[in-house]
Each structure stands twice: as structure tokens, then as C-alpha cells.
Image (tube, helix red, strand yellow):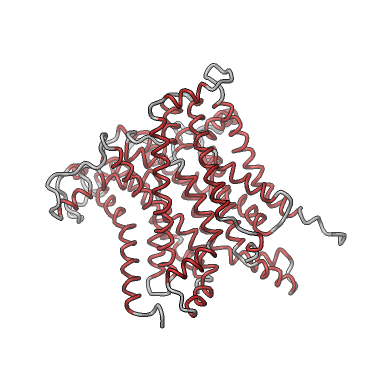
């Protein structure tokens, strides 16, 4: 059978492994630095294997002022952003994908337009508003701005997800006696779940990554990236690498936790 | 109508309203206020002074040029890499699920963290030099990230961004692929299409909605590339977003910062318009 030849297999595995190394090797290397003694950063030459493990560098970063509080703030902000974005965004995406109504294209363009305004400019007027509302320098303020930032993309991704699901299926279900709601819940929603999971993950990442608004909207309640970037230029190299690893580590944990869920979802129509 | 049901525009309106209200309050209104900032001088009167200060700044043109070069280099690399990864993960060979998981790992890595990860590789005593030395190609460390050669920093940023953000494109493509691909791919196989033909005539046309979303997302974010440039360049390589940040946080001048943001806005609007024209989803395709 075509595509089952051993040449195809060898090429596939060679490409797949090369790309996996491209993704994994940098993570290994920063992990290696993070768990080497502090002065290893300056040594030349240096082994590529973990011959000299130490928690000294990581302890230095974790016990540095503000690190743990900033980590907690980052998690709170990202979770709140993810939940709020999906609650607001998925219905809107569905509406754009499924219904023809006057002004639909204008709504679509309006959503895109709002996203084009850079974070720096949204953050400054909002900082003033949040001071008035007593929300300034709280995780909630950052999360609201992150939701505003993530929402257009959640809407567009969910719209494109629902667009790819045949409308005929829902109509067939309704012909067979389903209400529009149950047709949606039984037919479209399960097919859309992988895409919605992608949107949710993406939203978490947007918030976790965001440094601009977080740095402007907080003074003491820093998120992790806001904390690291404001001290970056005065920090020694080993502090930066430990910080880099500390921000990378959640990537591994998050994806490990949702791995089964992810693969189940990706397997739904992946056959 | 006439059958006692609510008018059919009511449901989409109700579905859209919460998001629309939220965006109006948290984006549209602050944006208008920000526009006012860019067209007022520090004294409060309407003026073009912020734009004059921005354009006469020696870092303005380099920032503009660097931002455009970064986008032109990063986006095509990300698309090709992401499509390759998505197709590999789509295979039914053993281990495809494992590779999908591995390729998705950078999803949760922040722009700042990615900059620091690649700093560990490109810095003077970083791992690239360690490896080159181990291969016997160099005796002393090569300086890649130098104040004299911003090109080195620029290429390092391209590598770091290709490494980090490709996963975001890939997940969008995989989500799109897996809903459309199976039988079309098999049909193409039955008719003897080769890999290039399958990608050209099956994958890319069917993936258009996902590609559209991924392209727009990545380009809008690339215009705001900031933390990775700071982490790798420490201010040597100006980009539009880092200049906006410096004018606001460093120089305490929100007016010039807003002017920079307007430049980003106009460039984003132009590219998004182009994408929508080139990749337009036609109404008859929406039911698919």
C-alpha cells in the first residue's frame, strides 16, 4: 500500500524525531543550567550532560523577593482569563459561523479591528479607569484586560471551528426531532470540542505570556513575566535562566495534566 | 415568520451581545481615549507633536524596519514548520500522538521565557558555542549577540519566535485538519496524488478557515513582539512595541507611546485586510 513503504516510514520518523529534538533540546539545555551551580553559567567549556546537579540556582530564584507571590498571581490571572473568554467568546463564534444576519461581516470586522489596538495603548486609559474603580494593582484588573485581548481570537477561532462542521448534520438532527438546542449539544458541540480546547489552551497561554499590560497595571501584585522583565537588566545570567526555566516548567505540567483529555479530543474524528 | 417564533436575528444577537459589550467597554472606549493621547501634546492641546517626536527619534526607522523584517522572516517559517508538524501528527503511524504532544509543548511557554531559553544558547558562553567548540570548529567563544551587530540579535529573535510560536499555529491547523482531512486525503490517495499534490489540492484549500485564523493571530502578535527582543537584545534591537513601552515606562510619555501604537495599528489593519482578501471564505463554503 502507498504510504506504508519502509522508505516512507523512515522519512516520517526521521522528520518527526528531528522536529521533536528542535522543540525539546532548548528546554533540556535551560533545565540543565537551572539545575547547575550558579557559577556553571560562566564556565568554558562546559559539559552537555548533567554531571553536576544542584538546586542552588533555582533556590536563589524562587526565594528571591516576590517570585512566589507573582507565580500565584499569574495562575489566578490566566485561569480567570481562560474561563471568562470562553464563556463570552464561544457563543459569539458560533453565532458568526452559523447565522446569516444583517451586519454579520461588519461584526466580524469590528472584532478584528478591536484586536489591532496594541496592549500598550489599551493599558494606559484602563489603568486610570481601574484606579477609579479600586481595581488597580489586582489580578482581576490584569485578567479583565487579558480577556479583552484574548476574546477576539477566541471568537475567531471558535467561528472557524464551527464553520468547518457541516450545518447539514444539525439540520438532519432537527428533522429527526431534535430541538435546535439539543441538535447543537449532541451534534455540533462534540465535533467542536477539539477546537474549543485549542482555543482555551491558547487563551491560557496568551494570559500567561502577557507582560505589557501586566507590567503597567500592577506595582506590587506583579505577575511572573512582569516581575522578571522589570528586574531583567539588573539580574545576573543565572537568575535569568532560572527564571526562564521557572516560566517554562508550567508548560510541561499543564500539557501533562491535560494530555489524556487532549488526545481523546484529537482522537474523536482523527480515526 | 408568522409562526409565533421569535425573529431569527434574535438568537445570534443574544449570542453576540455579551462579547460585544465586553469588547466595547474594555477595548473600544480605551482605544478612543488612547487615540486622543496620540494627537495631543503633553500640555493638553491638540497637536501632531507626538508624531514629530516619534519620527525625529533616531530609533524610529530602525524599529519600523526591524519589526517588518522580523514578520517577513518569522511568519513563513512558522507556517511551513507548523504544517509539517500538523501533517506528521496526523499520521496513523505509531508514536504520532507522542509527537503531537511534544510539538505542542511550546504552547504554554511565554515570549519572555523563550527569549531567556535562547539566550542560554546564543549568549557568549552559551550552548551553541559549547557545541561548536565540542565539534572542534571554534577555539574561543563566538559573540553572536553583539552591540555592534544587531543582525545577530535579529536572527536569534527569529529562531526563538519560530521555536515558541509555531506550536500555536500548529494546534489551530491540527484542529482544522482533523475535522476535514480523513476521506479527502484517502480519495486523493486512491487517485494517486503525491504528497505535494495532496497538500496543494486537498489540505490547503480545506484548511483555509484555520489558516486564516492562524495567520491573522500570528501577524497581529508579531507586530507586538517585545519581550523576546528585550531578553535577547537588551534594548540594542529596537522594535515598534519596545519603543512604545520605553516611551511610556521609561520616558513617561504616553503621547509618543500612543503614536507608536498607532503605527502598529495601521500596519496591522493593512495586513489583516490583505489576508481577508487573499483567503476569503465564500458563503457557499461555510456549510462545509
B167 lies left or right of A171: left
A226 lies left or right of B26: left
Q: Residue furthest right?
A: B2
Rendered location of residue A259, percent (x, y): 44, 63
Rendered location of residue A78, percent (x, y): 49, 47
As rendered, which of A71 and B130 lies closer to the eye? Answer: B130
In the image, residue B261 sits, relative to residue B4, either above or below, namely above
Residue A76 appears in view: no
- Quarter of the image with the N terminus of chain B in it: bottom right
> Residue visible at 33% across and 70% down?
A13
Rendered location of residue A6, percent (x, y): 32, 79
> Residue visible at 31% across and 63% down?
A18
Q: Residue furthest bottom?
A: A1
> Residue visible at 38% across and 29% down?
B59
Counting the numbered discs, the total is: 0
As rendered, which of A112 and B116 lies closer to the eye? Answer: A112
Residue A242 appears in view: yes
Rendered location of residue B207, percent (x, y): 53, 62
- Quarter of the image with the C terminus of chain B in it: bottom right
In the image, residue B267 sits, relative to residue B2, either above or below, namely above
Quadrant of res A159? bottom right
As rendered, which of B50 and A29 lies closer to the eye? Answer: B50
Amino acid at each position: 500500500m502507498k504510504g506504508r513503504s519502509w522508505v516512507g516510514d523512515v522519512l516520517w520518523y526521521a522528520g518527526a524525531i528531528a522536529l521533536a529534538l528542535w522543540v525539546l533540546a532548548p528546554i533540556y539545555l535551560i533545565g540543565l543550567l537551572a539545575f547547575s551551580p550558579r557559577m556553571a553559567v560562566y564556565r568554558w567549556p562546559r559539559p552537555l550532560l548533567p554531571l553536576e546537579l544542584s538546586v542552588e540556582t533555582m533556590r536563589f530564584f524562587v526565594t528571591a523577593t516576590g517570585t512566589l507571590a507573582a507565580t500565584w498571581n499569574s495562575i489566578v490571572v490566566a485561569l480567570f482569563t481562560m474561563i471568562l473568554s470562553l464563556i463570552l467568546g464561544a457563543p459569539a463564534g458560533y453565532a458568526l459561523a452559523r447565522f446569516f444576519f444583517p451586519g454579520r461581516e461588519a461584526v466580524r470586522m469590528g472584532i478584528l479591528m478591536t484586536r489591532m489596538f496594541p496592549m500598550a495603548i489599551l493599558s494606559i486609559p484602563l489603568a486610570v479607569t481601574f484606579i477609579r474603580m479600586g481595581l488597580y494593582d489586582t489580578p482581576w484588573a490584569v485578567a479583565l484586560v487579558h480577556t479583552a485581548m484574548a476574546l477576539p481570537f477566541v471568537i475567531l477561532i471558535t467561528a472557524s471551528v464551527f464553520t468547518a462542521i457541516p450545518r447539514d448534520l444539525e439540520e438532519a438532527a432537527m428533522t429527526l426531532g431534535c430541538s435546535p438546542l439539543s441538535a447543537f449539544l449532541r451534534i455540533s458541540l462534540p465535533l467542536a470540542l477539539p477546537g474549543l480546547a485549542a482555543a482555551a489552551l491558547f487563551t491560557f497561554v496568551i494570559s500567561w505570556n502577557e507582560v505589557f499590560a501586566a507590567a503597567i497595571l500592577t506595582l506590587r501584585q506583579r505577575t511572573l513575566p512582569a516581575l522578571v522583565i522589570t528586574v531583567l537588566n539588573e539580574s545576573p545570567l543565572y537568575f535569568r535562566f532560572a527564571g526562564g526555566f521557572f516560566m517554562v516548567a508550567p508548560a510541561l505540567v499543564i500539557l501533562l495534566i491535560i494530555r489524556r483529555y487532549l488526545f481523546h479530543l484529537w482522537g474523536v474524528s482523527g480515526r | 415568520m408568522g409562526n409565533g417564533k421569535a425573529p431569527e436575528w434574535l438568537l445570534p444577537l443574544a449570542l453576540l451581545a455579551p462579547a460585544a459589550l465586553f469588547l466595547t467597554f474594555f477595548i473600544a472606549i480605551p482605544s478612543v481615549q488612547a487615540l486622543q493621547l496620540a494627537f495631543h501634546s503633553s500640555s493638553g492641546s491638540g497637536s501632531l507633536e507626538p508624531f514629530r517626536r516619534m519620527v525625529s527619534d533616531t530609533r524610529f526607522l530602525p524599529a519600523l524596519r526591524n519589526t517588518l523584517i522580523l514578520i517577513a522572516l518569522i511568519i513563513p517559517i512558522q507556517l511551513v514548520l507548523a504544517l509539517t508538524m500538523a501533517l506528521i501528527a496526523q499520521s496513523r503511524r505509531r508514536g504520532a500522538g507522542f509527537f503531537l504532544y511534544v510539538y505542542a509543548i511550546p504552547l504554554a511557554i511565554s515570549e519572555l521565557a523563550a527569549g531567556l531559553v535562547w539566550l542560554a544558547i546564543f549568549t557568549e558562553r552559551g550552548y551553541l558555542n559549547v557545541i561548536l567548540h565540542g565539534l572542534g570548529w571554534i577555539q574561543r567563544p563566538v559573540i553572536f549577540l553583539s552591540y555592534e551587530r544587531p543582525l545577530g540579535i535579529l536572527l536569534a529573535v527569529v529562531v526563538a519566535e519560530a521555536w515558541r510560536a509555531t506550536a500555536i499555529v500548529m494546534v489551530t491547523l491540527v484542529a482544522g485538519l482533523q475535522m476535514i482531512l480523513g476521506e479527502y486525503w484517502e480519495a486523493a490517495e486512491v487517485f494517486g496524488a503525491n504528497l505535494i499534490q495532496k497538500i496543494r489540492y486537498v489540505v490547503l484549500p480545506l484548511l483555509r478557515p484555520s489558516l486564516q485564523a492562524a495567520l491573522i493571530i500570528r501577524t497581529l502578535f508579531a507586530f507586538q513582539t517585545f519581550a523576546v527582543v528585550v531578553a535577547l537584545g537588551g534594548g540594542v534591537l529596537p522594535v515598534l512595541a519596545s519603543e512604545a513601552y520605553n516611551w511610556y515606562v521609561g520616558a513617561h510619555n504616553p503621547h509618543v507611546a500612543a503614536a507608536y501604537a498607532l503605527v502598529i495599528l495601521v500596519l496591522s489593519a493593512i495586513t489583516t485586510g490583505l489576508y481577508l482578501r487573499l483567503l476569503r471564505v465564500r458563503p457557499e463554503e461555510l456549510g462545509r
